[in-house]
Each structure stands twice: as structure tokens, then as C-alpha cells.
Image (spheres, rainbow, N blue to C red):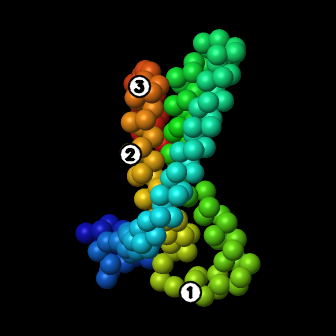
Amino acid sequence: MWRAVRLRKLLAPFIRRNSPRPMAKYWYIFAASCKDTLFYRSKIAAITGIWFFRMLILLFIYSYAYQFHGDIVNGLSFNAAVWSFAVYFIVISTGVRRTFRDISEDVRLGEIETKLNKPYQYILHVVAARSGVGFPSFVLSLLFVIPFLIFFIGAPSMSFSPVWIFSVLVL
């Protein structure tokens, strides 16, 4: 009995009594940012088109390089190289890498003082907002890039070992 009371006192600063779902507010921030982005459909289409165009340019460059040097360059096949930069473009389309720039801009403009007084964690708020902004482009990239590559390049060759799967799950 006394152990439970002691544990409860120890964990009291970390437990919020009135908030059954402490991460729900970040979900709402994500959803609001996503809805805000979805309002500008032409901007989403343009951003997705630009990513797709960049990927096509790299596809032509890689195909030329692999035709010039052979089937395998530095131990990497054409199929693996194309799929690796396609996954890179899909991950970059989320826009999460702009998180640091958003924080730096808030610091530069002097807005961070007011945002740190809010009842949420500022970093999680920025990550949730930035993820919500990039989510529509991420989904469109998944819907267009993967079928395009499967149709023109072929499915990626993957081999998974139990150690690799365990390491991915641990990370």
C-alpha cells in the first residue's frame, strides 16, 4: 500500500489529472494545419508536381549514368538507386526538415516568448504543425511516385533479415 502511495507521489508531476489524452492537442494542431493546407489545392498540386519533376530529372540522369558505366555502379544497381532517391523525395515531401527554420524564425521575430507561455510543449507544437502542412504532399507523393516507379522501373528488390527488422523496430 505504501509503495503505491510513494510511487504516485513520485510520478505526480508527470501525470495530468484533467487530461485523459495529453497528446490529443497535438493531433488537433496537426489536423488544423492539414486542413489549412488542403484549402490551397493548387499549391499542393504545384508542390507535388515540382517534386515529381525533380524526380524525373534525377531518373534521366541516373539512367544515363548507368547506361554509361554499366549495370552496377559502386555496388548499387539502377533499381536500388532509383528507389532510394524516390524514398528520399517522399520523406522530404513531409516538410519536417523545415521545423528548425520555423523555430529560428520565431526566435528572430521575438514571438517565442508568447509561445512558450502556452499550455503545450513548443517543440511538439511546431513538429505537429509542420507535419500537418506536409501531410497532403506526402500522401500525394506516395500515391503517384510508388505506382509510377513500380510500373516503369519495377518493384524494389528487398531482403529482410530478422536482425534488420528488429533493429528497425527498436529505432
Of 111 and 142, which appears nearest the observer? 142
Crowding at mark 2 (Cα within 10 Å: few <14, some 14-19, many 20+):
few
User: Is residue 75 in view?
Assistant: no
In this rendering, the answer to whether 146 lies above or below 73 is below
State which quarter of the image contains the N terminus: bottom left
Of 116 and 89, which appears nearest the observer? 89
Quadrant of residue 74 in the image? top right
Marking on residue 155: 3
Q: Name the residue under label 2.
A: 143
Residue in view at x 55 percent, y 74 percent: 122
Residue furthest right in the image: 108
Q: Mark 1 points at which residue?
A: 117
For the residues labelled 1 and 3, the Cα–Cα distance comes to 49 Å
For the residues labelled 3 and 2, the Cα–Cα distance comes to 15 Å
Secondary structure under badge 1? loop
Q: Where is residue 67 in the image (x, y as percent from the top left)?
A: 64, 16
Q: Do the residues labelled 1 and 2 touch (CB within 8 Å)?
A: no
Which kind of residue does numbered mark 1 sit on?
Answer: Asn
For the residues labelled 1 and 2, the Cα–Cα distance comes to 40 Å
Quadrant of residue 114 in the image? bottom right
Q: Earlier in the sequence, mark 1 or mark 2?
A: 1
